[in-house]
Image (spheres, rainbow, N blue to C red):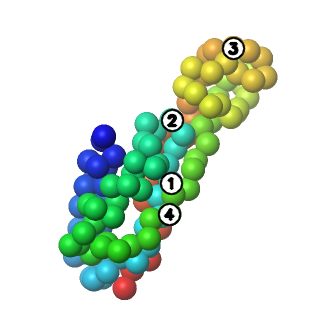
Amino acid sequence: MHEMAICESIRQILEEQARSAGFTRVERVKLAIGALSGVEPEALRFGFDVVMRGGVAEGARLEIEDVAARAWCMPCAANVAISARYDACPQCGSYQLQVTGGEDMTIRELEVL
């Protein structure tokens, strides 16, 4: 389950930010997770509380925003929604799509004290 490693990375980022920005506690963490990121939100929720114990984000609320996948179709020049990496263009049926969104995961917001 690579979501535990992702939680460890989030914790490291939060600890570094706490040191540099001078806050002592994280109350809320909002993540944006792309549909094509390979991150399973429920597994991430499961590991978040465990990994954050003993750190600045212990007891923090985790909010997850789902980000839809988008692609640009080369033949018809349309920006389209897709549900999987190798979907066909819903407008022209072409498979010549370049993914333009929904592949990443970012920390969108922090509520700190």
Q: Earlier in the sequence, mark 3 or mark 1?
A: 1
In the rendering, which numbered label is found on residue 4?
Answer: none
Is residue 92 shown above or below 81? above
Q: Earlier in the sequence, mark 3 or mark 2?
A: 2
Is residue 25 shown above or below 14? below
Q: Secondary structure at mark 1?
A: strand
Determine whether label 2 and label 1 are within 8 Å by CB: no
Task: Name the residue rendered at 25%, 69% in the picture.
Answer: 53
- What's under tag 2, amino acid-wise? Leu
Q: Give the spatial CA distance, label 1 vs label 4.
A: 9 Å
Is residue 26 shown above or below 63? below
> Does residue 13 appear anywhere in the picture?
no
Toward which corner of the image does residue 104 lie, by quadrant?
Answer: top left
Q: Give the spatial CA distance, label 3 vs label 2.
A: 19 Å
Q: Nearer the viewer, residue 46 or 39?
A: 46
In the rendering, which numbered label is found on residue 32?
Answer: 1
Discs 3/2, front: 2
* Circle 2 residue: 36
